[in-house]
């Protein structure tokens, strides 16, 4: 790893006291951004040759750079040099075409440009009046995406007949989407059960499959639900680890019989662990028996549903209360961008609304506008709608669908490689662009031995810097996850990764 060879503070120059400080001097803006854009372009050009995982130790950056902030200014070139020599070597390169871990964090030229422009404008669009175009753009982008997903018009901000009863908001992450809908569902259940204030919270119960993302259980605690009433429903191979509606009904009915109030059910389209799809319509039908809120977490796989061949995974969505998906995972829109849709926007805003005197204005009072602050935890918010709109406006539906289909095709190719090698097994049926596989137990190799072999395989693969895979546990088995989808990935990268997997497997099994 490079260092500058001298204390970075030595580059500091004594400022000219006669020169005014102009942090937005137009010539500086132009010069700095040109250099930043050149850096970004070079980064993408060279990223394939960089180790995906860095070889650094905790605290390394404080040793590389100064532990204290500088007193005096330095040329921007010094800042950029330190970025190149100290920061970049410590990065895990999520944009690398050799990144196959977790889920992809996709990006595109249009999204980067949109995020750059939004950052430059630096609007704080908490109310419509605070920045009309920012609110209008977010509403428009959300409605465009809703049409690509063929969501019912009840989830749209605007319909052909005017303003709809539903609506959407762009949040930072799925965690936020879960939290705000849990709060709305909590308040609705308290009203429904006749609770005085929050005294009835200990009676409220929430439900999800054991494959649901851990952020759900965290959000439940943040929303005030008693951990004893947070139900994690076991799944198994008989449903390919999806939520079993019969089991859900059994648990909810038992809670209702015990005097609890079933409040919220989370269904997932594309679980993080193994990409399982819960049966949305059947789950909604069970929840309706108890008037419970149904939320669909489609953070990753929701993007695939812009393709007609995958849209059936959302069948029944017209009967749920909310759905969220994250274009920053698979729809070429950089972090952060999670789109939350609700069927009745007032149920959300009634729980989250703030109306201080200093934010009152005629537009809000008219009831004709959406104040997005009332659909989120905080008040301030970024101009996220711009990058999402620029992605859809620049690339169009056909190119976005081509992007999804290409990734799925490469994942299928990798799945075929795995199935053709009798040392391996595919643990769960492939959905979308994730393959869950492992070295299988055979001969004298026990399941415990196989778990250890897979753990060693993953560690050795990742140490090479030529690929990065993550793992999960499915049915008590240690499983490798191969997630296709990095924006720069091509077939050759998948083939190279498979060759590396075969070679590394051979070295540990010989």
Image (cartoon, rainbow, N blue to C red):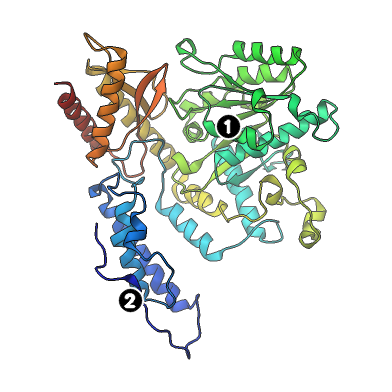
**Counting other residues with Cα less than 10 Å from the Cα at mark 2, is it few (<14), some (14-19), or many (20 or more)?**
some
- The image shows residue 309, relative to residue 178, as above or below, that is above
Q: Position of residue 327 (x, y in %)?
A: 49, 42
The front one of 203 and 403 is 203
Query: In percent of the image, x 44 and y 55: which residue is there?
Result: 112
Q: Which residue is mark 2?
A: 11
Looking at the image, residue 129 sits to the left or right of residue 115; the answer is right
Residue 454 % position (x, y): 28, 24
- Quadrant position of the C terminus in the picture: top left
Q: Which mark is residue 398?
A: none
Name the image quarter holding the N terminus. bottom left
Residue indicated by mark 1:
216
Task: Name the residue furthest left.
Answer: 510
Secondary structure under the numbered disc 2 in the rendered image: helix
Residue 408 rendering spot, x and y as whole percentages: 37, 30
| Callout 1 touching callout 2 (CB < 8 Å) | no
Chain-order first, disc 1 or disc 2: 2
Is residue 150 at least partly visible in the picture? no
Which residue is at a point 65% across and 10% down the rendered structure image?
Answer: 250
- Which of the pair 262/367 is nearer the observer? 262
User: Based on the displayed image, in which of its 4 quarters is residue 35 positioned?
Assistant: bottom left
Q: Secondary structure at mark 1?
A: helix
């Amino acid at each position: 790893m490079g260092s500058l060879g001298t204390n970075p503070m030595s580059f500091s120059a004594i400022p000219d006291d006669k020169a005014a400080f102009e942090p937005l001097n137009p010539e500086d803006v132009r010069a700095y951004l040109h250099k930043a854009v050149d850096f970004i372009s070079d980064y993408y050009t060279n990223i394939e040759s960089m180790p995906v995982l860095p070889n650094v130790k905790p605290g390394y950056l404080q040793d590389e750079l100064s532990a204290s902030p500088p007193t005096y200014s330095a040329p921007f070139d010094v800042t950029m040099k330190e970025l190149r020599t100290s920061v970049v070597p410590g990065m895990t390169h999520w944009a690398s075409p050799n990144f196959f871990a977790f889920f992809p964090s996709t990006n595109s030229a249009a999204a980067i440009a949109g995020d750059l422009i939004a950052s430059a404008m630096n609007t704080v669009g908490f109310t419509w009046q605070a920045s009309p175009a920012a609110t209008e753009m977010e509403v428009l982008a959300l409605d465009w995406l809703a049409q690509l997903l063929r969501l019912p018009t009840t989830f749209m901000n605007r319909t052909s007949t005017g303003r709809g009863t539903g609506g959407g908001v762009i949040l930072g992450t799925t965690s936020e989407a879960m939290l705000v809908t849990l709060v709305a569902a909590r308040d609705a259940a308290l009203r429904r059960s006749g609770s005085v204030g929050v005294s009835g919270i200990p009676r409220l119960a929430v439900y999800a499959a054991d494959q649901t993302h851990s952020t759900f259980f965290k959000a439940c605690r943040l929303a005030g639900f008693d951990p004893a009433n947070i139900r994690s429903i076991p799944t198994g191979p008989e449903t390919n680890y999806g939520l079993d509606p019969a089991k859900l009904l059994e648990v909810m009915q038992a809670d209702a019989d015990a005097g609890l109030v079933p409040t919220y059910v989370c269904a997932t389209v594309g679980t993080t662990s193994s990409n399982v799809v819960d049966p949305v319509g059947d789950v909604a039908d069970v929840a309706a028996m108890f008037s419970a809120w149904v939320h669909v977490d489609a953070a990753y796989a929701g993007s695939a549903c812009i393709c007609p061949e995958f849209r059936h995974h959302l069948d029944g969505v017209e009967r749920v209360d909310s759905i969220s998906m994250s274009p920053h995972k698979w729809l070429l829109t950089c972090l952060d961008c999670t789109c939350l849709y609700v069927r009745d926007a007032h149920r959300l805003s009634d729980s989250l609304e703030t109306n201080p005197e200093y934010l009152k204005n005629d537009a809000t009072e008219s009831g004709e506008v959406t104040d997005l602050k009332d659909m989120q935890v905080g008040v301030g918010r970024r101009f996220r709608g711009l990058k999402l709109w620029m992605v859809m406006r620049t690339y169009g539906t056909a190119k976005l669908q081509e992007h999804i289909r290409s990734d799925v095709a490469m994942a299928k190719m990798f799945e075929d490689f795995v199935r053709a090698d009798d040392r391996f097994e595919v643990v769960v049926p492939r959905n979308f662009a994730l393959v869950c596989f492992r070295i299988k137990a055979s001969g004298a190799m026990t399941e415990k031995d196989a778990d250890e072999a897979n753990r060693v395989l993953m560690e050795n693969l990742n140490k090479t810097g030529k690929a990065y895979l993550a793992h999960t546990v499915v049915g008590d088995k240690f499983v490798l996850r191969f997630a296709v989808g990095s924006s720069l990935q091509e077939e050759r990268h998948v083939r190279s990764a498979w060759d590396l997997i075969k070679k590394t497997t051979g070295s540990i099994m010989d």
